[in-house]
Image (spheres, grey):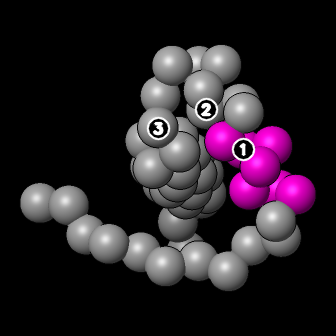
Amino acid sequence: MDSKLTLKLDKNVVEQAKLYAREQNMSLSKLMETYLAALTIEKKIGDRDQPLG
């Protein structure tokens, strides 16, 4: 199920992100979803690599 998210970002960052997303043939929403998913996967992998105790 999709969920709506509102962000306040620098206008120039948004414009550059839109251009990048267009070059990748994806929506800005999909770009952000992919990025956030990658961040959370990296975090889970990093947590798993930490020694217990």
Total numbered circles: 3
To which residue does mark 1 refer? 17
25 to 42, vertically: above or below: above
Residue 46: give x, y in percent of width and height: 60, 51
Q: Which residue corresponds to mark 3?
A: 27
- Marks 2 and 1 close (CB-CB < 8 Å): yes
Label 2 secondary element? helix
Residue highlighted by disc 2: 21
Label 3 crowd bin: few (<14), some (14–19), many (20+), radius 10 Å: some
Image point 88% across, 57% down: which residue? 12
Q: Is residue 49 visible?
A: no
Q: Is residue 19 visible?
A: yes
What's the residue type where badge 3 is placed? Ser
Q: Residue at x 59, y 77 (%)?
A: 7
Closer to the camera in the image, 39 or 49: 39
The answer to whether 27 appears left or right of 51 in the picture is left
Three-letter code, disc 2: Ala
Range shown magenta: 12-18
Q: In the rendered structure, are the residues bearing label 3 and label 2 in contact, judged by CB atoms less than 8 Å apart?
A: yes
Q: Quadrant of residue 8?
A: bottom right
The percent coordinates of residue 25 (x first, y second) are: 51, 19
Between the C-alphas of marks 3 and 2, the distance is 6 Å
Prevalent SS, magenta region: helix
Residue 49 image point, x, y percent: 58, 48
Q: Secondary structure at mark 3?
A: loop
